[in-house]
Amino acid sequence: MIQMTGVAKQFGGVRPVLERVDLEIQKGEFVTLLGPSGCGKSTLLKLIAGLTAPSAGTIQVDGMTPGSARERVSFIFQDATLLPWRNVVNNVSLGLELEKVGHARRNKRADELLELVGLQHVSKAYPRELSGGMKMRVSIARALATNPRLLLMDEPFAALDELSRDRFNEEVLRLREEQKWTAVFVTHSVAEAVFLSTRIVILAPNPGRIHAMLPVDLPFPRTAALRATPEFDLLAANVSRLLRGAIAA
Amino acid sequence: MKRWAAYIGNAAAVFAVLLILWQAIIWIFHVAPYMLPAPSAVAAALVTRRGLLLNALSITAEEAAGGLAASIAVGIAVALLFAQSRWLRRMLFPYTLLLQTVPIIAVAPLILMWVGAGMPAVALIAFIISLAPIIANTTQGLISVDENLVQLFLMHDASPAQMLLKLRLPNAVPALFVGIRIASGLAVIGAITGELYTGSSRVGEGGLGYSILYASSQLQTAYLFALVAAATVLGFGFVFIVMFLEWHFLHRWHESARALEVD
């Protein structure tokens, strides 16, 4: 699904943000990019989205350039990034509207997604009237409304408290089970990475590069109970150790 | 609604106290009526000369509204242009500051000379004085869009037209209203200033600015006070209408409009 070869990114400065990244992501994977701040994990995500161009190397999404593959890709930002002048239902249907889908069809689709994320009761509310968690639900519904095959998520739950974050993680896996998209997820939380991923990519900073890769072979469906198992703890300890190595490197 | 009633009630109470103080000063110090007329004399002037007064008010209101409407239209157009390029902003923005800093009193006679005395000239002065805040605020609103929102639109391959109509323009509406609110007060001031120079085709009859000049030359101080009161009401009326529209369009989604709900 995604192929990155020798990808580097430099913003004017002397030190590149990313250096020689080779990464291949298969269809159906849930890959988490984990690393300390300054390791270029968000930049890597924006490169896959085609929101910024690499300074060197090539990126292919579904065999196309990231720019032309966008139709199948949705991006979920760190904060909900809603249009404050639109109510919930019109925020959810924004992507469809920009892609010129007819009024009736996009409203129907928006309603379906609001039901999926449990927000039908606030469909006419404006973002300022919603809590942080509800806004993030709207943002997820908006991203899924265009039927993406690839979902890029940039620390979407970083601003939430731990309990809500756990619940959101379970919900993301439930949605993935139903809709079968491939995911690239950026976080700095080890527990989140282990719980969600089929594979974790650990990045090292200065300059950003891949430090280690680790498959997560915990069985699906994963539920809250998984977090209390020894296998989960063992993996988390392993990832933490690798992460410390990445910071020291 | 109750809060509004209380708010207006308080304002009225303060006004009543001021009136009593005013009357008391006249009684105690025996001030001559042509220096400071009694509130009752002003009220009498308001009633007996209401025809002239309303005529003056409507002339000035029309000029100010015309100037304001033009500055909103032109201001938005210029802001749209400015939002297109940083280079254009750097080149031309200093000139909009010039619009704001040029002393309109000094320029007004020139404009009358060029355009000829009359309502169009006065509306033009109102337009000039009210243009800069609309350009400055709207430009700011158009260019200060959350970078993530821009990227969101890019992810959906939004066209430049979609970017403008569905992102930049709605994003600029609160700032536009701030600009219009400032401009509406200025337009009234501009219209009255312009009228100080235009004169009138009929002696004693013209806009508020002309009438103020006429009343002061005739030492009709009570009428002069009535005219000043009318000018104040006009300026307030303009700002109030703009604030109402601002609240109407923005209260559901924007903080600034909610701040208008008096606390």
Image: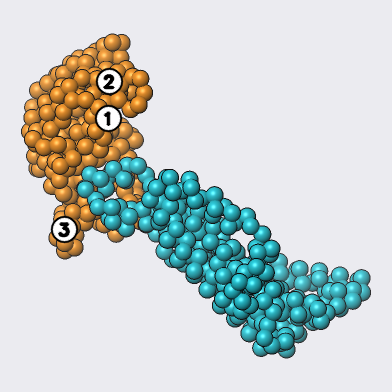
Chain colours: A orange, B cyan
- Give residue A101's mark: 3
Q: Are marks 2 and 1 in contact (CB under 8 Å)?
A: yes
- Give how far across and how far down residue A131 sits, in percent: 35, 46
Q: In which quarter of the image is residue A15?
A: top left
Check disc 3: other Cα within 10 Å, few if <14, some if 14-19, many if 20+: some
- Give residue A208's mark: 2
Q: In which quarter of the image is residue B238?
A: bottom right
Chain name for mark 1: A
- Give how far across and how far down residue A221 sits, in percent: 9, 33
- Give how far across and how far down residue B25 sits, in percent: 86, 70
Chain name for mark 3: A
As helix, strand or loop, the secondary structure at mark 1 comes to helix
Check disc 2: other Cα within 10 Å, few if <14, some if 14-19, many if 20+: many
Drawn side of residue B10 relative to residue A69, left or right: right
- Please state which of residues B112 and B149 is positioned toward the viewer in this rendering: B112
Same chain for mark 3 and mark 1? The answer is: yes
Question: Is the residue A232 above or below the residue A160 in the image?
Answer: above
User: Residue at point 16% right, 28% down?
Assistant: A58
User: Residue at point 26% right, 22% down?
Assistant: A18
Question: Is the residue B103 above or below the residue B22 in the image?
Answer: above
Chain name for mark 2: A
